Amino acid sequence: MVKNAQQYLEDHFCEKISVEDLSKRFAVGRRNFDRRFVKATGNTPLEYLQRVKIESAKKAFETTRKTVNEVMYEVGYSDVKAFREVFRKITGMSPLEYRNRYNKEAILD
């Protein structure tokens, strides 16, 4: 069940997904779903979803010249402050710092 939930999150991370939606989709109570997910992954479903979104954002910053706002919207965030806070929490740097350090196109210029 957890592997299927992880795959669903990875395939639909741009959509608005709640833990309630996930628990209903996999026919498990919310608390039971949370508990099983944390036990299997070490993260809550929300934390896992945030990590999937940030990994996608990192790839975009590494391989494109898209702005922070463009990438933020692409990965399913609509609040710049929230995106920056989660990005910094997971990567240890701001989205702009990350792009400037790891963007392959910028490095080649």
Image (spheres, rainbow, N blue to C red):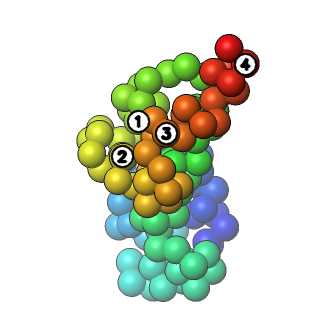
| Residue at image mark 3 | 97
Q: Which mark is residue 108?
A: 4
Element on which disc 2 rests: helix
Callout 1 environment at 10 Å: few (<14), some (14 to 19), or many (20+)?
many
Label 2 to label 4: alpha-carbon separation: 27 Å
Residue under the point 63% across and 29% down: 103
| Residue at image mark 1 | 72
Residue under the point 58% across and 85% down: 39
Q: Earlier in the sequence, mark 3 or mark 1?
A: 1
> What amino acid is at disc 3?
Glu
Q: Earlier in the sequence, mark 4 or mark 1?
A: 1
Residue under the point 60% across and 62% down: 6
Q: Earlier in the sequence, mark 2 or mark 4?
A: 2
Query: Pointers 2 and 3 in contact (CB under 8 A)?
Result: no
Front of the two marks 3 and 1: 3
Residue under the point 64% across and 36% down: 102
> What amino acid is at disc 2?
Phe
Callout 2 environment at 10 Å: few (<14), some (14 to 19), or many (20+)?
many
Label 1 to label 2: alpha-carbon separation: 7 Å
| Residue at image mark 2 | 83
Expressed as whole percent of the image width and height from the top left, the position of residue 49 reads: 49, 57
Query: Pointers 1 and 2 in contact (CB under 8 A)?
Result: yes
Above or below, 8 relative to 108? below
Query: Pointers 4 and 3 in contact (CB under 8 A)?
Result: no
> What amino acid is at disc 4?
Leu
Expressed as whole percent of the image width and height from the top left, the position of residue 18 reads: 36, 60
